[in-house]
Amino acid sequence: MAEVILNNIKKVYPNAEKSKKKRGKNPPAEEKKVNLQITEEGVVAVQQFSLHIADKEFIVLVGPSGCGKSTTLRMIAGLEEISGGELTIDGKLMNDVAPKDRDIAMVFQNYALYPHMTVYENMAFALKLRKTEKKEIDRKVREAAEILDITQYLDRKPKALSGGQRQRVAIGRAIVRAPKVMLMDEPLSNLDAKLRNEMRAEIIKLRSRIDTTFVYVTHDQTEAMTLGDRIVIMKDGYIQQIGTPQEVFNHPANLFVAGFIGMPVMNMFDAKLELTAGQYEAVLGEYRVPLSAEKQTRLKANNVKPQNIILGVRPEHTDLSEYGVPAKVDVSEMMGSSVHLHANAEGRDVIIIVPTIDTRNMPGMGALIHFSFQGNVVHVFDPETGKNLEW
């Protein structure tokens, strides 16, 4: 159990080849290539990463492939050297401390079990290396197996287990050590959808039964939203936003977060922000929406001027109506409890979620419809910077 503090952490991978200087000219100091920043030092994978993780908190690092989340996790584990900044665990500076001395445990994506050992031997291995007494090893292994419901598999080899059972063993091997910090690197990505749902529930139960700090890496926003006390959303090595699942869903800091969090993705429109009698309105074509009092207050506090904006509205916050924004239905998807209407409106693809209370009057392909939304659910973004103008 420990707090983890990352202060302005940076990771640079040195260039394999020195850049050739152009004759008579100096090369540019830095460039952008395949979402990575290339400098004279090398390839910058993580930059200006600062985060305070409280004792027993469950933090999720989420973002697209190549954003630096696994690299950050590996720096906490000691598997990657820290190029700049400071890492402290339980108040102790860890930059140059060997992984084995950090009192952390890590669960990998590919299980990393010893194939020639039984489940019991896999879980007991780290304790044997510590020269723990046999009785204590047996107690801890069986206790962890009971928590994870794998007691019946203790005598089996990994090859005789399913993917979900192997991941339980990998988690059990980590928790028997009672580490201060538990690191999990996309542990569910190799499982099918049903098993992922089951294992997410198991991890939530596990978290309530063991007192440790969790740092969890995933590219799956559903895992991030269901597991994390707070979510750290990353892109190109930088933190885009830190907040609770509800905060990042309701108040995305920028266009990237708005488009990354939420399924289906947020609808985006080219629109205008206007001031009418001292009140902000979002104008989309002929449709005008006065913003809520809360949004009015924040925009006025930021002294936001009338301007062109990107208007964001989540599919679940749109309603079919007799008036509003005109659209033409391209595809209608039956999803059980709702119908997802894929339509074209104002030159953009849009998704409208309609509850399946009565499917008899549901618009079909090619139908002309109108949809509307309220001023308390819209998001206004600067089209140039992508920043949420409320924040």
Image: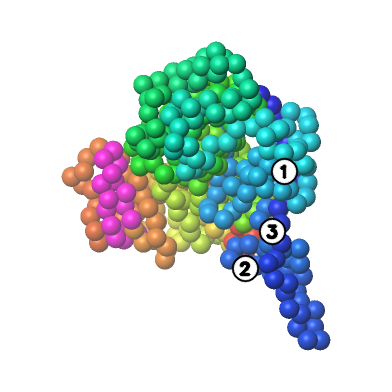
Query: Gap in Å between the C-alphas at discs 3 and 2?
Result: 14 Å
Q: Where does the magenta region start and end?
A: 327-342
Within 10 Å of disc 3 (Cα), the crowding (few <14, some 14-19, many 20+) is some
| Mark positioned earlier in the residue sequence (1 or 2) | 2
> Residue 10 in the image: x percent, y percent?
73, 51
Can residue 245 be seen here? The reply is no
Left or right: 130 with respect to 250? right
- The residue identified by callout 1 is 50
Quadrant in the picture for the N terminus: top right
Frontmost of labels 3 and 2 is 3
Q: Is residue 86 visible?
A: yes
Q: Amino acid at mark 1?
A: Ser
Residue 15 horizontal/vertical position (percent):
70, 66
The local secondary structure at tag 2 comes to strand
Per the rendering, the mark at residue 33 is: 2
Residue 138 within the segment the image draws in magenta = no
Q: Amino acid at mark 3?
A: Tyr
Q: In the image, residue 318 lies at what x, y percent?
A: 40, 46
| Residue 311 screen position, x and y as percent | 52, 55
Q: Are marks 3 and 2 in contact (CB under 8 Å)?
A: no
Query: Which residue is disc 3 drawn over?
Result: 13
- Residue flagged by tag 2: what amino acid is it? Lys
